[in-house]
Image (cartoon, rainbow, N blue to C red):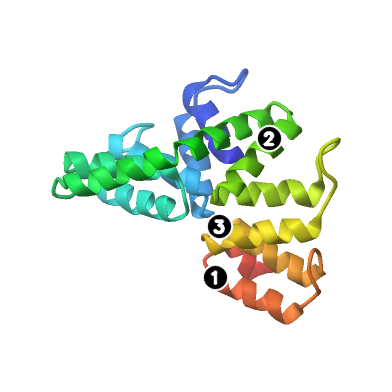
């Protein structure tokens, strides 16, 4: 999420000495989106929907990006799709589709709040606070929560939990089952190095190839 955060800094000039630079903001956001970052695609889709940050309004591309982000579990993308369906933006108005989208968002509001506060805790250096919030989100089945829980379990959190590669592997696997691209890549790495599981080069190759849309996986 670092590129998305930095893009926001360049767009609004609210991060200390970072100046407003919409070109740089768009470059960072598009780069993150090309790496299948769901948050980046959701933000980019919303900007294209509204024609902000120097983008011309483009409902078709916005919907494509938001659909992809929603499939990767981004709740804000589902909200934006609901607004598009309700207002008939690029499509015929569809109240039932809008209601389904808004219901989906309402049911996942707790996840959204947990993930937001977890990210705030992480950025502020509160690793323990971030860990517990991501753990709660993961226990609720959140893809993002599971992926970040795997990250923390691999490394451990001082005074809270020690490194546990096997538990990290399980968290990544559950996140990957929901379509999380970085988690699937990490599973390939773990199979390759025997980290959290038995070393298995063939399985690592299978995982990398199944993640063919990810350039880093293909490189590996």
Q: CA distance from mark 2 to mark 3?
A: 19 Å
Q: CA distance from mark 1 to mark 2?
A: 31 Å
Residue in the image at 58% along x and 40% along y: 3
Label 1, residues with CA under 10 Å away: few <14, some 14-19, many ≥20:
some
Task: Report x, y in % for residue 170.
Answer: 69, 61
Is 17 on the left-hand or right-hand side of 23?
A: right
Local crowd at mark 2 within 10 Å, few (<14), some, or many (≥20)? Answer: many
| Residue that mark 3 sits on | 180
As displayed, is residue 17 above or below residue 166? above
Labels 2, 3: front one: 2
Which badge, 1 or 2, comes first in the chain's sequence? 2
Q: Which mark is residue 212?
A: 1
Most foreground residue, 151 or 136: 136
Mark 1 vs 2: CB contact within 8 A: no
Where is residue 20? Give x, y as percent: 50, 23
Q: Secondary structure at mark 2?
A: helix
Taking 156 as reference, is 44 left or right? left
Question: Which residue corresponds to the image point at 81% horizontal and 40% vertical from the top-left?
Answer: 157
Residue on which disc 2 sits: 130
Image position, residue 88 (x, y; %)? 16, 43
Instruction: Determine whether the residue tagged by mark 1 lies in a helix, strand or loop.
Output: loop
Mark found first going from the N terminus, 3 or 1: 3
Callout count: 3
Q: Is residue 72 visible?
A: yes
Between residues 200 and 18, which one lies in front from this camera angle?
200
Q: Residues within 10 Å of mark 3 (few under 14, many from 20)?
A: many
Question: Disc 2, disc 3: CB below 8 Å?
Answer: no
Q: Secondary structure at mark 3?
A: loop
Q: Nearer the viewer, mark 1 or mark 2?
A: 2
Which is nearer the N-term, disc 2 or disc 3?
2
Q: Using the image as rendered, state which of residue 205 and residue 33 is in the foreground.
A: 205
């Amino acid at each position: 999420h670092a590129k998305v955060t930095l893009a926001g800094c360049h767009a609004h000039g609210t991060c200390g000495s970072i100046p407003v630079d919409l070109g740089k903001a768009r470059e960072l956001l598009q780069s993150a989106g090309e790496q299948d970052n769901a948050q980046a695609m959701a933000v980019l889709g919303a900007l294209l929907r509204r024609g902000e940050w120097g983008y011309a309004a483009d409902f078709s591309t916005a919907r494509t990006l938001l659909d992809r982000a929603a499939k990767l579990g981004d709740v804000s993308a589902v909200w934006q799709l609901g607004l598009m369906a309700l207002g008939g933006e690029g499509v015929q108005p569809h109240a039932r589709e809008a209601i389904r989208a808004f219901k989906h968002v309402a049911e996942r509001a707790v996840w959204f709040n947990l993930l937001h506060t977890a990210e705030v805790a992480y950025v502020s250096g509160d690793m323990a606070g971030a860990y517990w919030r991501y753990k709660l989100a993961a226990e609720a089945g959140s893809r993002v929560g599971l992926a970040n829980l795997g990250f923390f379990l691999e490394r451990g959190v001082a005074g809270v939990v020690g490194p546990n590669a096997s538990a990290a592997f399980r968290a990544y696997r559950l996140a990957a089952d929901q379509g999380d691209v970085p988690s699937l890549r990490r599973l390939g790495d773990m199979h390759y190095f025997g980290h959290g599981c038995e070393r298995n080069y063939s399985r690592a190759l299978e995982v990398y190839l199944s993640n063919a849309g990810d350039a880093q996986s293909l490189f590996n």
